[in-house]
Amino acid sequence: MKNSAHPVDVTVGANVRRIRVAMGLSQEKLAEQLGVTFQQVQKYEKGTNRISASRLVLIAGALRVDINDLFAGANVENASPIAPRLSRDALRIAEVFDKIKNKTSRQSVMNVVRVVAASHDTVTEAAA
């Protein structure tokens, strides 16, 4: 019987992937920085292979995040990955949005997104 991945390993892997994608970093480039194959990075991101403590430190450094960011959302009771259903486009938008420093501009962008999303829902409902 094959052992399934521990929920914390899955969460950490999903966080590695989320941060890597948001940075626009390929699995190949991250693997190169870590001295492993891109297949190994894939296994880390899926939670198939556990990441050692020393490798976690290297990954955090390569991704330029605090090591605690890799554990965000991890607990034994509820170890679901953060934002597991966001598309690549959504992650890219989030990355660019975080670069907007002006509070008024950020709010304006949020309002535009809300209006567009609401109008899309209305169009979808009308077509149904």
Image (cartoon, helix red, strand yellow):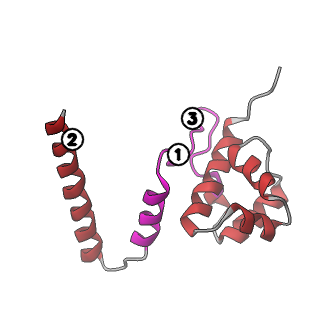
The amino acid type found where label 3 is placed reads Asn
| Residue 79 quadrant | top right
Label 1 to label 3: alpha-carbon separation: 14 Å
Dot 1 corresponds to which residue? 84
Magenta-drawn stretch contains 94? yes
Label 2 to label 3: alpha-carbon separation: 34 Å
Residue 115 is situated, as x and y percent measured from the top left of the image, at 19, 57
Q: Nearer the viewer, mark 2 or mark 3?
A: 2
N-term-proximal mark, 1 vs 2: 1
Q: Nearer the viewer, mark 1 or mark 3?
A: 1
Q: In the figure, 89 relative to 23: above or below?
A: above
Element type at marker 2?
helix
Residue 124 badge: 2
The residue positioned 58% from the left and 61% from the top of the image is: 21
Residue 78 badge: 3
Element type at marker 3?
loop
The residue positioned 86% from the left and 66% from the top of the image is: 35
The amino acid type found where label 2 is placed reads Thr
**The magenta stretch spans which residues?**
70-98
